[in-house]
Image (spheres, helix red, strand yellow):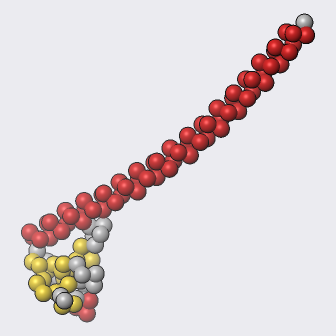
Amino acid sequence: MSKIRISFIAALVGAATTFTSLNGMAQGIDTTVKKVGKAIDTTAKKVGNKTASTAVKGVSAIKDKIYKGKQAPGGEVVYIDNKDRKYYVDKKGKKIYLKPSQIKDKE
């Protein structure tokens, strides 16, 4: 009878150890999945911003005039729309309209 009790206790201790270690492994996997998910999210945003910027610059180059000999504060190309407003396209693909004082001569 004592051998059965010892075997039963050993089985319970083994099961408890197994469940505890599986829980710890699951938390480690969960943390890794979160890190990978964050990396994918960051990369997807960068790719999306670059795509938007390229698309807007392409449309602006065809549709609007390029202000030759001038540049925006960051050295960006300055475009002139049909309402004679000057703007440049930022890294996220957004048109940033400029004041006359912000437009510089190209170096």
**Vertical arrangement, residue 10 with respect to residue 71, above or below:** above
**Residue 41 located left or right of residue 86:** right
Front residue (pair 96, 71): 71
Front residue (pair 36, 60): 36
Residue 93 lies in quadrant: bottom left
* Residue 106, image x, y percentages: 18, 88
**Residue 82 located left or right of residue 55:** left
Taking the view exactly as shown, the residue that stands out farthest to the bottom is: 101
**Vertical arrangement, residue 41 with respect to residue 92, above or below:** above
**Vertical arrangement, residue 99 with respect to residue 48, above or below:** below
**How many marks can you see?**
0
Residue at image location 56% in from the left, 42% down from the top = 30
Residue at image location 37% in from the left, 55% down from the top = 43
Residue 102 lies in quadrant: bottom left
* Residue 89, image x, y percentages: 24, 73
* Residue 55, image x, y percentages: 19, 62
Residue at image location 64% in from the left, 32% down from the top = 22
